């Protein structure tokens, strides 16, 4: 039904346009469908491309598990000290997360973890365990709207609101974390979310860590589907132009790049690193065998994050003295 409405709407739009263009005594003749320039053909093309774009954005960019039940909890991964948290966004949605706490939590930095698509926070528990044990941090795992137990449906504007709400929530949790030691972490799509948050809250996060993140959605579409890239880009509403905002970020950024990533080409991470011209203390860490979903399994992955976090905190302490 939705496609039919879209199609006939496009037909009417094209017919109206033809009648306007034709005008006068030639209006009737101009309105006769001619080969591939006919209104019906154009309507078919427009409706197909609109449908293709809608499917790409909803089923690919914002793919989420069909089962909204979280399969595991932090307790199943030897992290029993955690809270189920519900965070209200500026547009009234309620998103769900887990705040995993260390003993004497405020003495340790805290990472807000933004995951990629096609997963929820229960799929990130192995990663959270690595950070908890090896990086020595508290972790706020948060599901975007439309993922896991969070309300709503995903969109670029919505995910940005979710990220801001998660950050503001942590700022109020003085019992758990020091606001000056909050780091942002984003994997794949989550990297774009983390960068957007960092640009909007410039100077607030202590540092940013991103893994296998694309430069922009237009560039990724060009890589994944060159045949339809122009049409998809024209119709997409979710652009995620990280390459445009990263030059504005001054906080230290760690780029974790799996050089065997089969979806996001590694040169995009290199391009983002080179574009981060104002980031003080930026780093690019390359993992030669790291793939799109398995870079975190690479040798030295969590040790790299640990060194970055420790260095940034040490430098911040020196500046404050």
Image (tube, rainbow, N blue to C red):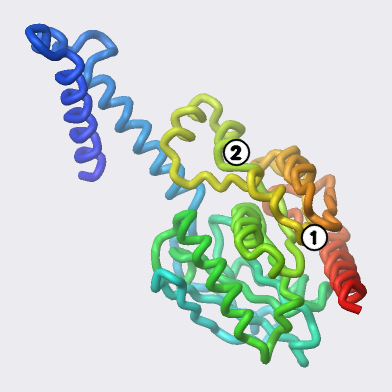
Q: Where is residue 111 in the image (x, y as percent from the top left)?
A: 71, 72
The residue lying toward the viewer, choosing from 202 and 74, is 202
Q: Where is residue 130 in the image (x, y as percent from the top left)?
A: 77, 71
Residue at position x 60%, y 36% in the image: 219
Check if mark 2's residue and mark 1's residue have beta carbons within 8 Å: no
Q: In this view, does 263 lie above or below 255?
A: above
Q: Is residue 286 visible?
A: yes
Could you tell whether 192 is left or right of 25 in the image? right
Residue at position x 70%, y 79% in the image: 179
Q: Residue 252 carries which label?
A: 1
Cα distance between the residues tagged 2 and 1 = 25 Å
Residue at position x 55%, y 37% in the image: 218
Q: Position of residue 245 (x, y in %)?
A: 64, 49
Q: Which mark is residue 69?
A: none
Mark 2 or 1, nearer chain start: 2
Q: Where is residue 311 in the image (x, y as percent from the top left)?
A: 89, 68
Q: Which mark is residue 220?
A: 2
Residue at position x 20%, y 28% in the image: 11
């Amino acid at each position: 039904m939705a496609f039919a409405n879209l199609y006939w709407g496009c037909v009417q739009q094209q017919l109206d346009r033809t009648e306007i263009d034709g005008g006068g005594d030639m209006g009737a003749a101009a309105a006769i469908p001619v080969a591939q320039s006919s209104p019906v053909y154009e309507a078919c093309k427009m409706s197909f491309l609109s449908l293709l774009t809608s499917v790409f954005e909803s089923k690919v960019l914002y793919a989420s598990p069909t089962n909204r039940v979280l399969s595991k909890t932090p307790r199943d991964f030897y992290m029993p000290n955690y809270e189920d948290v519900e965070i209200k966004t500026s547009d009234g949605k309620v998103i769900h997360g887990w705040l995993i706490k260390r003993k004497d939590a405020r003495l340790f930095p805290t990472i807000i973890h933004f995951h990629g698509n096609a997963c929820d926070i229960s799929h990130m528990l192995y990663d959270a365990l690595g950070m908890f044990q090896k990086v020595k941090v508290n972790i706020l795992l948060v599901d975007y709207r439309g993922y896991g137990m969070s309300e709503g449906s995903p969109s670029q504007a919505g995910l940005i609101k979710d990220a801001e709400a998660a950050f503001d929530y942590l700022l109020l949790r003085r019992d758990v974390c020091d606001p000056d030691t909050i780091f942002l972490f984003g994997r794949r799509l989550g990297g774009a979310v983390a960068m957007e948050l960092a640009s909007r809250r410039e100077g607030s996060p202590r540092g940013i860590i991103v893994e296998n993140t694309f430069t922009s959605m237009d560039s990724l579409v060009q890589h994944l589907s060159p045949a339809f890239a122009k049409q998809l880009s024209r119709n997409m509403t979710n652009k995620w132009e990280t390459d445009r905002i990263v030059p504005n970020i001054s906080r230290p950024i760690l780029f974790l790049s799996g050089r065997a990533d089969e979806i996001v080409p590694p040169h995009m991470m290199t391009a983002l690193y080179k574009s981060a011209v104002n980031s003080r203390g930026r780093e690019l860490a390359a993992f030669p065998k790291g793939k799109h979903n398995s870079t975190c399994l690479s040798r030295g992955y969590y040790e790299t994050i640990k060194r970055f976090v420790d260095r940034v905190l040490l430098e911040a302490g020196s500046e404050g003295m």
